[in-house]
Amino acid sequence: MPRFAAPTDSVRAPSAAPTSNRGDPPTPAPPPGRRASAGLVLGVVLVGQFMANLDVSIVNVALPVLRTDLRVSDAGLQLVAAGYLISYAVLLITGARLGGILGYRRAFLAGLAAFTLTSAACGFAPRAGSLIGFRFAQGASAALMTPQVMSIIQRTRSGPARNRALGYFAAVIAGGIVVGQAAGGLLVDADLFGSGWRAVFLVNVPVGLLLIVAPRVLPADRGHGGPALDLPGLATLSAAVLLFVLPLVLGHDLGWPAWTFASLGASVVLVGVFVLVQRHVAARGGRPLISPRVLRAPGLPAAGVALLLAPCTWGAFLFTTTLHLQGELELSPLRSGLAFIPCVGAFALVSLSVPRLSGRLRRPAIPVGLSFAAVSYLFLGPTAGGGVPYEVVTTLVGLGLGVMPLIISVALEHVPVEDAPDASGLLLTLLQLGQVIGLATVGTLFLTLAGDTGATGHAEWGVGWALAALALLAAASAAFLVRGPRLNRR
């Protein structure tokens, strides 16, 4: 699942995304020589953001064809989808910090160049193993490029112009999901020059080359140094995530050997080590990857749990539904891609509309929407035969989950300005990790229930109940955000 940002007038502009180190100078007004190109600056960075979001969803529709062509195992299929998200999630905060140290323009251009090259590498990958490796590298490139988008917007626009730019940013996030699902099916079905599934990665290359104008367009800035990167924190968090995800992905194919359970136990231990490392860095006056002070911010714990569980269901839903559409329902890649349009269109409609609700309605809308999604998931099994009933259910899921972007902006309303970059970085990281966990857990459940016979319709029953339970837990956590206004009366 892609990153989200929901621009609202009630949220401080710096809270929208992880941007820079504390102590940044105030955002300057665009110099006169740059005003004429402000629209071009926005267009360039939004295209980069669109590419990164596109690659979260565009690969889903190509997975069944890719499995046949490269003879990819079920575990390999999950790693192709999750590898991008794993490195994207783990490196997101570090990518934002590098933007502050090196300069946002330089970091964006480096990330864009790397993203274009790794996309080409994915498209020409000869084997499943190399494709998975390139997907991890592609996610790392996106983690360097995308945090700079919000920083550049903040530093080139102010006032109403900035709010409009944030609105375009949210539209690009939602649009990337819609276009990714549909474009994936269109590209695979078209089989341009016999490229098949490879086209879903190679499409980034000409777009990346078109952005060769970026160095001339983007405003120059210089990095301002600041605290060193939290490399021990990054190392322990990365190891904890990999030791948790890999056994869940590989365990099904390997018959759950002893090392998978040992790996899961080790991941829990490393989470504890990560907490100790973060406290140690903070005690020494450094800037930890995840600040303990940020974790104590009002509403952050509840929002964090909701942003882990809700995207967990969304990422798993996109993965399993694609396999069912092209499995037992025997839809072509194009038709299965088009089948997602009502669902992701409903998601985009809600995600762009809900932030405009009045203050009294915005907070309750979050648990209501997640509860609505939970009920909708229960009907995946009964309507798994396809047709209009199944299409309606998937659309209702999109409507319910459309409140996810609102969680971030509501949670950040009570975060001090100086902690906003770290807080938003934490929430966005949890959002990405949620998708990884969903793919690894619910995805494995789906493949296990479908079995060797490919009875994906039968698997939809168990998956529907699992997704409903996770969405309901997310709604219960989000319910604590409804009490947020009381926190102002401390």
Image (spheres, helix red, strand yellow):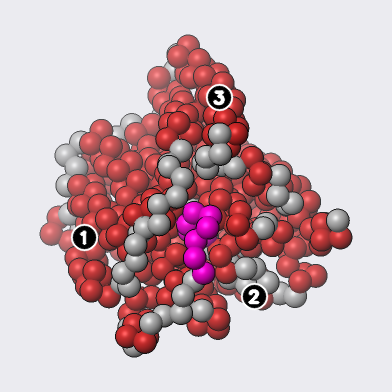
Mark 2 and mark 3 lie on one chain; the one further toward the N terminus is 2
Q: Residue at x 27, y 55 (%)?
A: 110
- Rendered view: 62 above or below 254: below
Q: Which residue is mark 1?
A: 205
Tag 2–tag 3 contact (CB < 8 Å): no
Query: Magenta stretch mostly in which secondary structure?
Result: loop
Q: Which range is magenta?
A: 17-26
Q: Residue at x 43, y 41 (%)?
A: 229
Tell me the tag on residue 9: 2
- Of the pair 427 and 443, the residue shown nearer to us: 427
Q: Give residue 449's position: percent from left, percent from top.
A: 52, 32
Q: Amino acid at mark 1?
A: Val
Q: Report if residue 20 lies within the magenta region.
A: yes
Mark 3 and mark 1 lie on one chain; the one further toward the N terminus is 1
Tell me the tag on residue 273: 3
Tag 3–tag 1 contact (CB < 8 Å): no
Q: Secondary structure at mark 2?
A: loop
Answer with left or right where residue 417 lies relative to residue 223. right
Furthest residue toward top: 258
Q: Residue at x 71, y 59 (%)?
A: 414
- Rendered view: 336 above or below 207: above
Q: Mark 2 and mark 3: span between their CA atoms?
A: 39 Å
